[in-house]
Image (cartoon, helix red, strand yellow):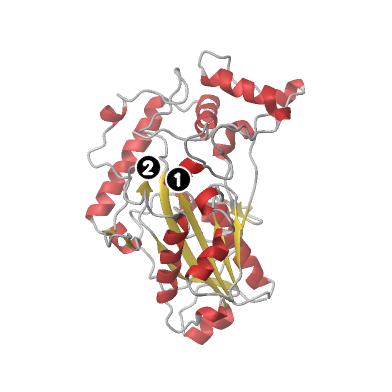
Amino acid sequence: MTEAYIVATARSPIGRAYKGSLKNTRADDLAAQMIRAAMAALPGLDPARVDDLLLGCGLPGGGQGMNMARIVAVMLGWDTVPGATVTRYCASSLQTTRMAFHAIKAGEGDVFVSAGAESVSGMTIGSSDHIPGRDLTNPSFADALARTFEHAEGGAPAWTDPRETGNRPDPYIPMGQTAENVASSRGITREEQDAFAARSQQRAEKAIAEGFWARDITPVTLADGTVVSADDGPRPGTTVERLATLAPVFRPDGTVTAGNACPLNDGAAAVVIVSERVVTELGLDRSRASSPPASAASHPRSWASGRSRPAGAHSPARASASATWTSSRSTRPSPPRSSPRPANSASTRRNSTSKAARSPWATPTE
C-alpha cells in the first residue's frame, strides 16, 4: 500500500472579520491564491494530474456556497479537475486532508489538493447555518435551546446532563456558551484563561519579531493591488492586566471575554498531497507518513473540548502527534514548502476560522 505525503503548503494571512485586511476578499479568491501558491512550489507537477480538489469550509453557503471547490477549480483553469466542498466546522480542511490521504492509500489517485477557506466577513448576507430573520433549528430541540439561552442570561443553575432526565442536549449550542460550560465543569478560572491568552499573544509577538510568520505566510494580493503579508490577530503589548479589564461576552457572570476567546477571521490555506510514486518522480526527499487522524465527538454541551487523534493511538506519543497542530509553533522551524510531510500533519491548521457571523454562534471581538 502506497504512502501519502504533503509536498507543498501555503496559507494566507489571517484577517479579522468585518474590519480586517481581508474583509472585502472572497473566500474563493483566497482559496485560489493559496492553491496556486502551493502548486507553484512544485514546478514539475502538471495541474492536469490533480485527481480531485477537496476544500473544507465551515459554513459553505452564501458567497462561499455552490460547491466552492469546483468554483475554485474553474477559476484556476483546471476545468477537468473535479471538486468537493466539505464541512466539519473548524476541522473541515483537516477532514479533506484525511480524505486525500485515504484516497491515495486506497489507490484512487496520486495527486490531491486539500484546501480550506472561510470569509466570515462575507457572511452578512447569510451562510449555510444562518439566513437573516429565519430560524433554521429543528423544533424538536426547542427545550434544549431554551436551556442554553437560560444559561446565557446568567444566574442559572450549574449545567447538568439533560440525558439523565430523558431530555436532549443542545447540538446548536454557541461556541462561547460551550466554552463557558467547559470552564465551569473543569474549574478553569478567568485568571487562567487571561494568562493563557496573554502568553499566546506575547509568543506571537516574539515570533513576528524573529521573522517566523514571514516564512510561514503566503502574501495575498487584493483587488486594488495591495499586498497583505501579516496576520491581523496579534496584539503587541497584550498583558494580563489589560485583559482583566474586559467584560464577559457570553454570560454576565461568565469568564470568556473578547480577549481570551478566538476572534472571527477570514483566511485560506492549501496543501498538495501525493503518492509515494509521485514523490519519486519529482525527486523529493521523503519522510515516512504516519497514521491518519481519526475523529471523535464530545458531548454537545462541551464540544469545544473535542479533538482529533491518530487512528489506533494507544500511547501518549501517538496521541500527541495529532495534538501538536493546535499548539504554539513559535519555537519550531517552518518546514520547507517543497519538503514532504506526513499527510496527517494538517498544515491547514489555521484556515477554519469561525462558526458563523452575526448569529448566535458569533464570537464578539474586541
Residue 84's tag is none
Looking at the rendered structure, the kind of residue marked 2 is Tyr
Q: Is residue 122 left or right of residue 194?
A: right
Q: Label 1: how many residues lie within 10 Å, few (<14), some (14-19) or many (20+)?
A: many
The spot of residue 11 in percent (x, y) is: 40, 60
Residue with the mark numbered 2: 18
Which residue is outermost to the right? Answer: 166
Q: Mark 2 falls on what kind of element?
A: loop
Viewer-side residue, 345 vs 315: 345
**Could you tell me which quadrant the C terminus lies in?**
top left
Give the residue displayed 24% in from the left and 42% down from the top. 236
Nearer to me, 80 or 264: 80
- How far across and how far down the image is residue 326, in percent? 46, 49
C-alpha distance separating marks 2 and 1? 8 Å
Whether residue 333 is visible, yes or no, is no
**Quarter holding residue 228:** bottom left
Which SS class for mark 1? helix
Number of the label disc, if any, that sits on residue 120: 1
- Taking 3 as reference, is 32 above or below it? above
Q: Can you say whether 77 is above or below 170 in the image? A: below
Residue in view at x 53 percent, y 75 percent: 78
* Pointer 2 or 1: first along the chain: 2
The three-letter amino acid code for the residue at tag 1 is Val
Q: Are marks 2 and 1 in contact (CB under 8 Å)?
A: yes
Instruction: Estimate the x, y position of residue 1 in percent, counting from the top left.
Output: 67, 76
Residue 74 visible in rendering: yes
Q: Residue at x 42, y 65 (%)?
A: 34
